[in-house]
Image (spheres, helix red, strand yellow):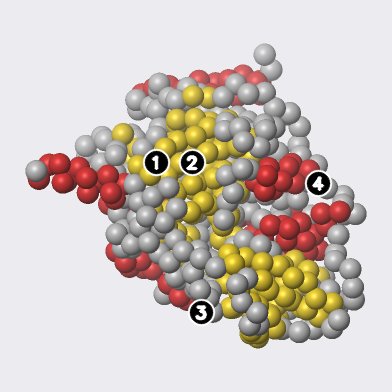
Amino acid sequence: MGFNNFCSALAYFLVGLILIAFGTCEGGFTSNYVRRNDLSLDMPLDSDVFRAPPGYNAPQQVHLTQGDHEGRAVIVSWITPDEPGSNAVIYWAANSKLKKSVHGIVLTYKYYNYTSGYIHHCTIKNLEYDTKYYYVVRSGNTKRQFWFTTPSKPNPNTPYTFGLIGDLGQTYDSNRTLTHYEMNPVKGQTLLFVGDLSYADNYPFHDNTRWDTWGRFIERNAGYQPWIWTAGNHELDFVPDIGETKPFKPYTHRFFVPYQASGSTSPLWYSIKRASAYIIVMSSYSAYGKYTPQYKWLISELPKVNRTETPWLIVLMHSPMYSSYVHHFMEGETMRVMYESWFVEYKVDVVFAGHVHAYERSERVSNIAYNIVNGLCSPVKDHSAPVYITIGDGGNQEGLATEMTQPQPSYSAYREASFGHGTFDIKNRTHAYFSWHRNQDGFSVEADSLWFHNRYWKSMEEQSVAVS
């Protein structure tokens, strides 16, 4: 055995001893599914998924997100490459011939030696709930038509289905992931994206033309259903060596979110209601210590959640709080220490994260009992705790995270290093069904799944039984 191999073996042995010492052995299931072990390759620039629409200055990279806190607005965003063109969106309800128009803003940015096209953001407000709308963006004689459907009014028993993708990139595997999501018979109505979008920063000088190819790649889905954005580490784009000292510049110019509607001071953390869900987006790469803006916002946001109206409380972040993979191991620990007790107190149902390029689902555990003298510093089962799901397996070119800590810790219920996507299918106020789909399987195959019993309503039922 060589010296490097000996050191690796010794490290794994010591990690194993530590895990056993803290009582975290006897974990869940580690999949033995065998997948390719090579890096995922970028699709070539002449791929059809990157093709610009025909016509001079044709609008491209069209995408939607929610435009308010309640679900009655959408932000329509697109880019025209040569000149501003029209900054208006024409829209109408599918059951009406009355067409309306609304104007937005146009902006550009420079990054190193790159100058963006003309980025349009237009918010359509006061939409009717549960209604299909058509919309048109245009430039000169070129116009392009899309559609979207608004959610039902926030209501505790409204069924609604979210898709889940993270760490997507623009590789052949990225395309398989997005196709698999689109073909899933359980149709996602809105996509929750947990960070790391284009991976443009992996190219020389953070080549921002790769933001444009990615925007054209996702348009086929994001132009028709809202994508709820979370910023990851690959959105930072902070490179003082080339004069780029403003973090998140390409991301914040290209992807608008309704952060001010929830009282946030930054587009990197915000909240929305959608049907029967309340979604809180956090930023793993912004300051989150005590008294920071993100901290002060979250501590005032959680008490506002009305679980009798929106019973499902979902948190999105990029770096996972619980992960048993070697790569990025414990990078989310400081955020866990800061906020886990709040998630338990407010009975968050599920926390979705990315960052680790694999899939993992946790048990309901918490690690909040420690008080510096009691020695209680290991995760324990906690029925008030959320399930933590890592779904950073979208398909980027950095490949899969295949190394896992051994033995599998007790907080880990299922883990597998494969590319895929998830769906969170809310049935009513008490039950939702999560499923994870690996790319290699048929569209309807569930590689992992779990029935969720809502934390708030389960607690109410238990209290009711105790009182009676």
| Front of the two marks 2 and 4 | 2
Q: Are marks 4 and 1 in contact (CB under 8 Å)?
A: no
Residue picked out by circle 4 = 42
Q: Are marks 3 and 2 in contact (CB under 8 Å)?
A: no
Inter-mark Cα distance, 3 to 1: 33 Å
Crowding at label 3, few (<14), some or many (≥20) Cα neighbours within 10 Å?
Answer: few
Total marks placed? 4
Residue picked out by circle 2 = 434
Residue type at mark 1 is: Phe
Label placed on residue 452? 1
Query: Does 399 sit above or below residue 139?
Result: above
Crowding at label 4, few (<14), some or many (≥20) Cα neighbours within 10 Å?
Answer: some
Residue type at mark 2 is: Phe
Residue picked out by circle 3 = 126
Could you tell me residue 145's position as x and y percent? 74, 70
Question: In what element is the residue under mark 4?
Answer: loop
Query: Does 263 sit above or below residue 307?
Result: below
